[in-house]
Every structure is written in C-alpha cells, then in structure tokens.
C-alpha cells in the first residue's frame, strides 16, 4: 500500500453523504480530512451540530474556496445537492484537480440532465471531462468522477452480467426498487415526518425517478438495444438500505444453473460483490454499514422470468463507500482500503 | 337492517385472525359471539391471555364440538391454520350449516392443494360444497365460504377490472407483493424475531407462495388464457398491511384515461374499493384497521407497462373483515355493517 | 340513550387531534359532524388532503365564524395549537355555548400559563368559566371543558388513588414519561424527521414540559401539600402511546396488597380504567386505538418505592377520546358511547 | 503499539455477543481470530449461517477443548449464556490463562449468583480468581476478567462520579433503564416476536433484573452505605442501545455547575466517556455501533433531583466492545485500539 497520506477536502458537509464520508474516512489508513466546506453560512464546530462526532473530529466548515482547496488537498469530494457542483466544478476541472462528485450533476448528458433534473446542465466542455464510474467496473481515464446514484448502483449491479452479454429481453426489464429513508436526505417534508414513514410503505416518483436515465445510459453501453426500463421506487420504513427486485426475461432460454454461473463468473474477482448460492436471496440487513452489494437469483420456469435481488447500503455502496472505492482507484490503492466492514447483525 | 341477532362461534381463537374477528365483531350491531373454540387444550379466560380484551369479552375457549356449535350458533368461523378445517368441516357441511373458513383448506382443488400445501386435501364431495368468495364480487350459492387469502385479495382486486375484460397480456403479469409481519402469524421462528425483521426487508417464498394457485384459479375464471403469474412476496418491517405492485402489459394499447375509467366503472358501486385519482398511488397507512382496498394506477407510455398499486389491511380486508363482509351477504345485511372503519392517521 | 343527534363542529381540523375526532365521531351513534373549521385559509375537501377519509367524510373546512357555529351546532371542539382558543373562545363562553377545548389554553391559571406557555393568557373572567375535567373524575359544572393533556392524563390516573387519600411522600414523586411521535404533532422539525426518531430514544423538555403545572395543580387539589414533581418526557420511536413510569414513596408503609386494593377500589366503577393483576404491568399495545387507561403496580420492599405503570393512547384517552367522554357527560349519555373500542392486537 | 499479534479464541459464537466480537475484531490491528467454538453440535461454516460474514471469515465452529485453545490462542472470550462458563472455566483459571467472560457467571459472589441467576455458582476458589472489571476504571490484577453487563455498565458510568465521592442519597437512587431488543438475545420467545415488540414498550423484570446486584456491589465499593437501588428495565422497539435515566438526590446541595464539573473531572482522561454540555442530554443514536458512553446532566432545583442520562450501545460498550477494551488493557495496548468507531448518523 502506498503510505503517502491523501489529503481530502469535502464540500457539502451537512447532508447524510458528507457525514458518511467523515465516518468512513476516519478509519481509512491513508486519508487525512484537511477541510470541510459548507455551501451555506453555517459555521459551527461540526461536533456541536452532530454530537456523534464529538472527540473524533475537530473541524469547522469554511467557505469552499477552490484555490485554497487545491493548495491544501489532493482530492475534493462534492457531497452536495443537485445543482451545486455544476456551478462550482469549473476551476477544479480546468486545473485537472481530482474530483469525486456524489451528486447527479455530471452523470447525464446535457439534454437528459435538463429533462430529469429540470435544471440548466453544466457546460458541455465540462461534462466532457467527467466520467461516470461504477466503481466495481472502474476504468481510469478521468480526473472527474461522477459517482453513481444509489438506486442506479444497485440496479446496474443486478443487471450487468446479463446486459454485458446482451442477454436481456429489452422490452421486459421490470425494476421494483425500495429504499430506506436516508436516501431521501435531510430535508424536512411531510414525506419525511416520522408519522408518515413509520408503519407505512409508499411508492413515489413512479416512472419519474432521476436515476432512470442514469441506468439506461449505462445499460445501453453494455447492451445497445436497451432504450427503457420499467422502474419504480418505494420508501421503506427503515433508515438505510436498498432492495432492488428485478424481473427480467432473456432472449434465449438459459438454465438456472447457467444464469447462476454467469453471475459468479462476472463477479468472481470483485471483492465487494457477493453472489449468493442459487435460489438464496439476500436481505438488506446483511449489507448495512458496508460497501457490499449482495446479489441472489431465482428463476421461474413457468413464467420464464428471472428474479434478481440486489441489496446495498444506500449511504455506503450507494454513495460514500463507492466514492472512497473510486478514490482508492485514483490513488492506486487496493480498492478495499478503509472499506473492509462487517454489518451489525443485531 | 335485519334486527335478528346472529349468533357466532369462532374456531381457532389464539391466532391473529381469531383475535381480529373478536375486535371487529364487538362493534357489529347484529352479532353476538356465543362461543370460542381452541384446537389445543389451552383453556384460560381469553382476557387473561390477551389483556387488551379485558372488560370486553368474558369468554373461555372450549373444545370445538360441532353438534354443540350448530345448536347454539347460526354461523361458525374457522380461523385456523391450514390442515384443520379440512378434517373438522364435514359435520357442518353435511348439515348445510353456514361456515366461513379463513384458512386455505377449501380454496383450491384437491390436486393444487396437495401440491402447494403439501397436505392431504379434503374429500372431493366436501370440496364441491365450498365456494371461493372474493366478497366484493360475491355470488351467493354456497353454505361454505372459502374466504380468500390476504395476498390473493389484494392481487385479485388489482387485476379484476382488466382480467374481467380479457385485457391482460397473459405472459407478462408481474406481481411484487409485500406484507407486514402479522400476515405470517404468531409462530415463533427465526424469521419472526424482532431483530431479523426490524430495519430489514426480506423476500421469501419467491414463486412458491401458496396464494399463487388461488390467484391464477380466479384470474382464469375471468380470463381463461391466464395460466401463470410472476409472483413474489416480501416481508415489510411493519405490523400490518399489504402493498401489491402489479406490472402488466395489455393486449391492445389503451390510453391512461381509458384504463382509469375501466377501474372506476368496475368499482363504482363497491363501497370497500376506493379507486384513487389517476397517477395518485395509495399507501398502506390509509387502509390500516379498515376493510378498504385502495387502488391506484399509473401508465408508462415508454415501456407500455401499467403499474397498479393495491393496498389492504391483511388482517381486515385480507382476513377477518372480508369474512364479516361475506357473513353480511349470507345474512342479507348491508355488506358494510360493522365494517365502517376509518384508519388511524397518526 | 338519548336518541337526539348532537351536532358537532370542530375547529382545527388539520392536526392529529382533529383527525382523531373525525375518526372516532364517525361511529358515535348520537353525533353528526356538521362543520369543520380551519384556522388557516386552506380549504380543500378533507378527503383530498387525507385520502384515508375518502368516501367517509364529504366536508370542506370553512372559516370559524362563532355565530354560524352556534346556530348550526350543539357543541364545538377546539383541536387547535396553544394560543388559538384563548383568543377565539370569548363569544362561545359569553353565550354559554358548550365548548370542549383540547388545547392547553384554559387548563392553567393565568400566571402559570404565562410562565409555561410563554404566551399572554386568556382574560381572567374567561378563565373563570372554564373547568379542567379529567373525564374519569368528571364533575359537571361548566360549559367550557378544558380537556386534559396526554401526559397529564396518564400521570394523574397513575397517582389519583394515592393522592386522593393523601398518601404520597410529596418530596419523592418521580415520573419518567414516554410518548410516541403523534404527541408532538405534525409540524416539520428536525426532531420529527424519521431518521432522528427511528432506532432512537430522546429525552426532551426535562423538567420543562408544559404538562407539569397541569399535573401539580390537579394533584394539589387532591393532596394539598404537593408542590412539585420530578417529571421528564422522552420520545419513543412509535406512532402512538404513552407509557408513564411513576416511582413514589408513601408517608406510611402499606402492604403491596393494600396498595393494590386502593387502586381497585378507586377504579372499580370507572369503565375506562383497567387495573391489572398485582405485579402485572401493562404495555402500550394493549390500549392503542382505545380510550382505556391500563394501570399496574409493583412494590419494592427493599427500596420502599412503589412503581406504578400507566398506559394510554395519547390520541384517544389523551385527547380525542377523553374529549368525547367529556361530551358524553355534557349530554347525559353513557360515558362509553362511541368509545367501546378494542386495540388491534397484531 | 505492541505489534505482536494476539491470537483469540471465542467460545459461544452463535449469540449476538459472539457475532459482535467477530465484527469488531476484524478491524483490530493486533488480533487474529484463530478459532470459534460452539457449545452445541452445530458445525456449519459461519458465513453459511450468517451471510453478512461471507468473504470476511472462513471459520467453522469446533468443540471447545481447553487444552487445544490454550495451545493455539493467547486469550479466550466466553460469549455464552449464563451457566456455561462457570462449568467450563476451571482449566483456564488453573492454568492462569487469560479469559474475558462476557457472561454473568463470575460477576457476583456465590450467594448473590444463586439468588439472582437461580443456578449453582462456580466454586469459591474459582470465583476468587475472577475480577469484575468496568473497563473505564480498570485495575489490572487478574487473569480472569468478568466483563460487566450492559445495564450495569450504563448505570455505573452514570453514577460513578457521585458514588466515588460518597455524594449519593442512598435511599433515593432511581434508575429507569431501557434497552433495545438485542440485549435480550436470540432466543425465540413470545416477547421477542416482532409483533409484540414493534410499536410497543414493555417493562420487564421490574426490581428483578440480574444486573441489580452487580450494580449495587460495585456502587458499594465506591460508597459503602449503598445497599439497594430502585431499578426497572424496559424494552424499546429498536435493535440496539441502552438509555439509562437516573434520578438521584444528594446528601448536600451542590450547584448544577459543580455537579457538571464533577463529571467532567472524573471523565476527562477517559476516551470512551463523553460528558455532554450542561443540560444537554445525549440520545441513543449518537453511540450506536461505538464503544462510547455519552452522559448528560440536568438538575431540578425545585425537586432537588438530578437527572443523569447515560447512553451506550449494549452490544459494544455493553458487551463486545468493553471486552476488547479489557483485552487491550491485558495486553498493554492503547485501550482505544480497534475501537475508534463513529456512529452511523443516518
């Protein structure tokens, strides 16, 4: 392992993503967090706002001055809401400074971004510099990493082995995705009030979630005839975790054993993807707090539908953990560095 | 309303279904519960075992003697595990005594029952006397009501308007169903331990749930070319409620407005089915504690998939409430009698 | 039972209390809800805002015009935040019109109100017309009922049998009270965000809860030497329910049996108070959705502390249910009318 | 830090405590887990039984042979139910082999153990070799560490600063303690069924919890006139966490500031104890997954009661984490080694 310390700056520290970066980076052996930055004026010592950080971090958010960040840090994480990094990224991109962006601003082409986020996209010459990077299929060729969204990560990992071999029936890809509350962030809305979430289950943004174009864009790279997916998202009354149920048909009939083997082969050297034994399906709890994506398959010979279950922790594999995995790649560290975590069982 | 009092006996009082019957029947203006019966030897006063019944019921379970029940009651509810009523029902059936059976024993034909329940079915001449009765589509022609299962109820109500008109693409009916814990009953298993349910989400019995043949059997009556459905069931970390997400294609393309109208027309005179405004989807909380099934639709013109959401309280509409609705039919009462309940919002 | 229909108006319909009144009054055999009133301008049909009311209520909130209300209704419920009824109640009080006020505005004397609610109290001549009425100890002598607070109800019912006999050691009355989220209302705050409540437990307003003076004021009427109580409140990660743990010493030592008998005697003719068997303690679930207060005792001969557990549903016994019980008294109905409810066990 | 690797054996691997040891020891830089041992015959590869351990541990439980363990390991953890280690510990004790016992078998003297655990205690000469060790007040003088219980840890840390100075009014020490479900272990009982825990709150073992004598025994060492405490335990509907509310009076009146200072002084060099700012109270969430005990104080000048809140993760600080802290002491490691963990905020 490269023993040099990586100096890290984080922009957008008050959301769940930023806090999760702080939690995970604390135990990363090669990282030092040099500065944290708010996009608002709020400037209280971080452990005053968040008592769980008391005695662990003595940092106070400061304004995000790109020049200062580039002088003191080796890499900057954007853990901001959509619409922020597209306006702030320019000096970093022009200086070829390493950026890992957890927001959606650089994941889509300009037209898709405008359609799905209903905001003006980043200028094209900046978008051209960014690379969408599903960390488990990482190919290093950019200074600007667009870190995938949580639903997109779980869905793409569920479908990758089949799409990469062009096996999916492109008209019948049905994704029923569910997420815990943290995926929706800290904003105070009726839909995040405890009473409306607890003992409830709600579908939201059916066919309208902004991760849809992100998924189809990547699937298309693997299997070009895929133009759309049937994709719905629902809110689970839990804090963390994504459970993706994918129901797919294949162009040619394959045995359950063959399908299982395709998944095992695709993921055999990927330390964060654990393929379950055939017909065994993973549950959310087994990955919470970790960077694992656990995947299970079961085939129905009557309906010809294959059910693929993919579970991740939306805050780790779906955000901060994958971002650190991408950082490890950028710095030629073992990709598991700082991310060897076991779920709390009880 | 017929002012005669209906004397009710309940067999199988220690499970959730029996307790829910007691809860609902307490406020039924035409019912008196004359006796409760255990299938085990346990014979403690019911409010000692269940303090929530204190001061409301002074009943002690007694052995289920058919002759005695037929002398003292007008109708008997079986709220027993599968495998009980098939052996106990004979004297009631032969006497043409009214029975409402909440268990699965008389829902399927003999061969399907043997396959899915892995038990010896009831004799054919008894099965012939029973009638599967989805209460909202009730047709009175039997003394023995096989009350539908919870998942089956939610799924059939979601699909009925399309199936009844033969509109479903029979090869692409995908049901992703989720239920709260009470659906699985009181037995103490690893999968019902709090730690394994709370903050978790688990798929179980994928393609193997015993409600599958019950659903296809009824769908087939409406649309004969339906032979199978893609059906999975998952456990939500909540006490009550079923949320069915159905993804279906249609044989001919219909506008979203036409689809909405088909549902509104089918359910316009059915007091317990509430069709939501187009593109508005119901959540579980709005039906908990009630006999409502709330249904919402949203159509995706890109994928040609219609998403149908159906929510019920598995203990009420999915069990005891529907059983009482069926009882109301048998006694020519208004079907809403005793069932006009509003969900607790908070 | 008096068969005359009571026409009810409700002011403050958008909070949990108002919705719970609607839920309970729907099945009250002697009540018709004639109008609902908002204190804001919002005027959408109520079942549009709250889909769980669809097909049950066709009401749209209108401005609260006292003259109009007094012409069309027999009684008005205030289910408003603190600070509203003190300003709106005057015309009702001056007309001797029946008011049941679920808010805190008329529970305290002017000086205590100013101190604990940090608001200008109602004028003294109006306060003089109001009567604080713990429904289970109701004495009819006012047109204006100040309905007790939820914590106050649970605590007073726990202590009443001892205080009424002057038995409490007034320096060692320790109340550790816990409530589900609905007690805090619908406002969107960091502390009501799902993530901050779920899998958490938080003490708030320690020694500062506004129900403290309400409790001591009533205790003092029973046992005049009581001047203060040690009282803390915590938030349980559940929707409903209050669990009061009271730890008290007595002036003279009494046997556990004698203590049990004092409670059984005090509550023997009170249909909503269920005293558990000695050393058996109630849990929250057994009263949810009902107007019961369940009370259990256990005495520790080593420490000389008696533990008293009192559980209620904060929305029913602690708000809307008790208000209806008070209404039943005002109209000389059996106090259980419309309130004979059994908790959902599962 | 001593770079020698500590070889660890764990007896009792199927309970939550053993699994938590595996989780935490995985990232302990000086530990290698050499063997795990069941007390039953079950011998499946651990990650088959517990999929969350897949790819992290390749261990299969083997019978616990003391000689073999002493040859291959440097220390053994007992993470067994009560009644096991008292029978199995003898060869380890007689060989002066290092043992850290998470069970209750060696925490009490023989007579107290017999009374509270209703089992035959370990022989006196073995009990004499064991040392009850609250890790934050560790004094190394034994090979056999009796690791404190979860409730005892939270309570003792709440009271230590006052007891150590003899300040507590010994007749009015009231502890209202609450715990998440994992504290009760994996056994399948009615009280661990999801339906009975979720949306509920239950007091259990009031005045009878086996941690009571453990607490009084330690308090007595600090303040000899303490003979009893008023102590109740309740079950929170969450997975993890203990929240202790202690209500105490003092012999002499001290200002709130002085009390705060006593706590800050006592804990100023103890890295795992975080004293909150005066009148700020910790919540459970801020310590989950960590070895911290967070403590907050608020004084009521009217009642003269001081409220002390102490929160811990029952599985970490209350079990496996404290055991590792004790192990770090035994091996002269920094006590925080492997335990520098930050709670998941969301």
Image (spheres, coloured by chain):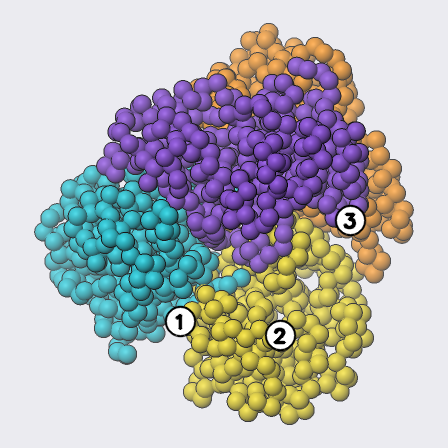
Chain colours: A purple, B cyan, C yellow, D orange
Q: Which residue is mark 3?
A: A41
* Quadrant of residue B315 within the rendered picture: bottom left
Report x, y in % for residue A67: 78, 34
- SS under mark 1: loop
* Disc 3 packing (10 Å; few <14; some 14–19; many ≥20): few
* Disc 3 and disc 2 on one polypeptide chain: no
Front residue of C306/C60: it is C60
Q: Which residue is mark 2?
A: C40
Q: Nearer the viewer, mark 2 or mark 1?
A: 2
Instruction: Check the residue under mark 3 and report the chain it is in.
Output: A
Instruction: Check the residue under mark 1 and report the chain it is in.
Output: C
Q: Nearer the viewer, mark 3 or mark 2?
A: 3
Horizontally, is B2 left or right of A222 in the view?
A: left
Distance from Cα at disc 2 to Cα at disc 1: 24 Å
Report x, y in % for residue A25: 68, 29
Q: Residue at x 18, y 64 (%)?
A: B139
Q: Nearer the viewer, mark 3 or mark 1?
A: 3
Distance from Cα at disc 3 to Cα at disc 2: 33 Å
Relative to B168, is A126 above or below?
above
Most extreme residue toward the top is: D71
* Disc 3 and disc 1 on one polypeptide chain: no
Q: Which residue is mark 1?
A: C55
Most extreme residue toward the front is: A125
Relative to A98, is B244 above or below?
below
Q: Residue at x 28, y 79 (%)?
A: B1
């Amino acid at each position: 392992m490269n023993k040099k310390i990586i100096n890290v700056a984080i922009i957008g520290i008050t959301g769940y993503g930023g806090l999760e970066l702080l939690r995970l980076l604390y135990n990363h052996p090669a990282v030092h967090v040099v500065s944290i930055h708010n996009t608002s004026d709020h400037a209280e010592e971080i452990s005053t706002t968040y008592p769980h950080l008391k005695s662990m971090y003595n940092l106070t958010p400061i304004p995000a001055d790109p020049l200062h960040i580039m002088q003191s840090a080796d890499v900057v994480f954007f853990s901001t809401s959509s619409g922020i990094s597209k306006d702030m990224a320019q000096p970093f991109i022009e200086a070829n400074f390493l950026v890992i962006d957890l927001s959606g601003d650089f994941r889509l082409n300009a037209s898709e971004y405008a359609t799905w986020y209903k905001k003006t996209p980043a200028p094209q010459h900046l978008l051209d510099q960014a690379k969408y990077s599903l960390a488990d299929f990482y190919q290093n060729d950019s200074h600007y990493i667009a870190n995938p969204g949580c639903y997109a990560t779980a869905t793409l990992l569920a479908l990758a082995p089949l799409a990469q071999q062009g096996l999916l029936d492109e008209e019948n890809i049905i994704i029923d995705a569910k997420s815990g509350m943290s995926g929706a962030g800290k904003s105070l809305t009726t839909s995040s009030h405890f009473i409306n979430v607890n003992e409830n289950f709600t579908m939201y943004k059916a066919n309208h979630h902004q991760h849809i174009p992100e998924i189809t864009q990547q699937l298309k790279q693997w299997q070009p005839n895929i133009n759309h997916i049937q994709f719905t998202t629902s809110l689970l009354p839990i804090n963390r975790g994504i459970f993706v149920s994918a129901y797919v048909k294949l162009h040619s009939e394959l045995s359950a054993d063959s399908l299982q083997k395709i998944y095992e082969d695709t993921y055999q050297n990927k330390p964060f993807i654990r393929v379950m034994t055939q017909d065994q399906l993973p549950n959310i709890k087994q990955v919470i707090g970790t960077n694992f994506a656990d995947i299970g398959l079961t085939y129905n010979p009557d309906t010809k539908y294959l059910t693929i279950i993919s579970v991740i922790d939306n805050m780790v594999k779906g955000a901060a953990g994958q971002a650190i995995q991408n950082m490890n790649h950028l710095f030629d560290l073992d990709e598991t560095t700082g991310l060897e975590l076991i779920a709390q069982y009880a």
